[in-house]
């Protein structure tokens, strides 16, 4: 099902309602598992159009820092980061809404994680709106356990399978390719799902209900994928050397987000709220010149096994 300009705001309202409910649900689950801190909400307005509500948790028993943000921004001109990806949209006005989250745990045995689900409309007078969904979730462990990685990908597959059997392998491959640091020749983590420009069903027909349903499924499956891993690993013992390695690997997160991430660039180029955009940064990180893990160590195993795309479900 496509839609024209008379319908677009009806659909935008439905997506916004879902996204705000998703933000509420994820925050409630994360607060329950942390037990030591609550999210604080910071509502904000964007002078050029739109706004959002940023929710930040700091100094928790489980999470050193985490953010779960909702935003809806709009403007008269698509930013350069979007038109570089979709040059045919140059000159169009836009609406963009989404939920984005990043979680940085205290314990190096608990992976960092990121998720995002979003909806765009690009408009031009006299032409039908162009719309699409995007999103996904990915996992960045420091001391990975294979069972956790398999569970993560099994849950990702369950999110996709009701909508078409080709979505999981396609979105999994897209995630491996997107969350890749070319200057390091390594993936950011063990992947998950990434998709963009979704507006059709498997038959190739424009279909809002299908695309919206798949986006909702990805959003709803994030905590099903992540929370069981957190529960298993949050009380594991660790030492200062492991903490130092966690902080070193967090540096890769900073490198990716500031150099390659399209969402960060989109937010900054649209005049978004800088504090909310950069809430994805870890509270602490470190860099070490010419670091090399000890051979046959747990740290070496991360590089040798987990920072390369793998067929985790085969």
Image (cartoon, helix red, strand yellow):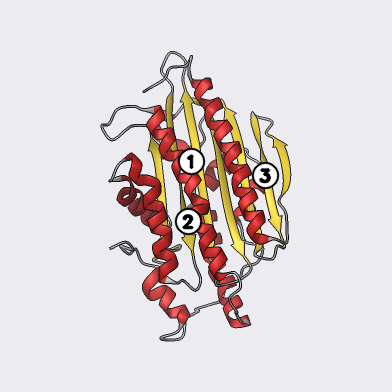
Seen in the picture, residue 256 relative to 143 is either above or below; the reply is: above
Dot 2: within a 10 Å radius of its alpha carbon, few (fewer than 14), some, or many (20 or more) residues?
many
The quarter holding residue 16 reads top right
Q: What residue sits 28% from the left and 45% below the top? A: 165
Q: Quadrant of the C terminus?
A: bottom left
Seen in the picture, residue 12 relative to 23 is either above or below; the reply is: above
State whether residue 270 appears in this view.
no
Label disc, if present, on residue 199 of the rendered structure: none
Q: Is residue 196 left or right of residue 228?
A: left
Q: Is residue 226 left or right of residue 184?
A: right
Identify the residue under disc 1.
Answer: 81
Front residue of this view, candidates 314 and 98:
314
Dot 1: within a 10 Å radius of its alpha carbon, few (fewer than 14), some, or many (20 or more) residues?
some
Seen in the picture, residue 159 relative to 12 is either above or below; the reply is: below
In the image as oriented, which residue stretches furthest toward the bottom?
Answer: 295
Q: Position of residue 41 (x, y in %)?
A: 72, 45
Identify the residue under disc 3.
Answer: 54
State whether residue 118 appears in this view.
yes
Q: Quadrant of the N terminus?
A: top left
The quarter holding residue 104 reads bottom right
Front residue of this view, candidates 122 and 72:
72
N-terminal label among 2 and 3: 3
Q: What residue sits 70% from the left and 62% below the top? A: 60
Q: Nearer the viewer, mark 1 or mark 2?
A: 2
Identify the residue under disc 2.
Answer: 225
């Amino acid at each position: 099902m496509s839609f024209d300009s008379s319908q677009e705001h009806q659909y935008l309202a439905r997506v916004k309602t879902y996204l705000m409910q998703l933000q509420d649900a994820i925050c409630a689950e994360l607060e329950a598992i942390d037990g030591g801190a609550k999210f604080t909400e910071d509502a904000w307005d964007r002078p050029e159009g739109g706004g959002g509500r940023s929710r930040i948790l700091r100094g928790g028993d489980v999470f050193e820092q985490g953010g779960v943000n909702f935003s809806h921004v709009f403007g008269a001109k698509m930013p350069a980061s979007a038109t570089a990806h979709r040059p045919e949209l140059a000159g169009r006005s836009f609406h963009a809404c989404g939920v984005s989250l990043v979680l940085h745990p205290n314990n190096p045995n608990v992976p960092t994680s990121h998720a995002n689900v979003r909806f765009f409309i690009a408009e031009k007078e006299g032409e039908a709106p162009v719309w699409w969904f995007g999103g996904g979730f990915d996992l960045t462990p420091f001391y990975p356990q294979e069972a956790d990685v398999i569970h993560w990908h099994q849950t990702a597959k369950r999110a996709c399978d009701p909508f078409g059997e080709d979505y999981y392998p396609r979105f999994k491959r897209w995630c491996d390719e997107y969350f890749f640091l070319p200057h390091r020749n390594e993936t950011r983590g063990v992947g998950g799902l990434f998709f963009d420009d979704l507006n059709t069903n498997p038959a190739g027909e424009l279909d809002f209900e299908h695309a919206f349903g798949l986006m909702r499924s990805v959003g709803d499956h994030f905590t099903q994928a992540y929370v069981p891993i957190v529960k298993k690993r949050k009380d594991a013992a660790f030492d200062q050397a492991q903490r130092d390695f966690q902080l070193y690997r967090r540096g890769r997160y900073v490198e990716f987000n500031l150099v390659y991430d399209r969402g960060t660039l989109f937010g900054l180029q649209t005049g978004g709220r800088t504090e909310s955009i950069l809430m994805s940064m870890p509270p602490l990180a470190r860099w070490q010149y010419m670091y090399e893990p000890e051979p046959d160590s747990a740290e070496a195993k991360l590089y040798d096994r987990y920072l390369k795309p793998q067929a985790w479900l085969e």
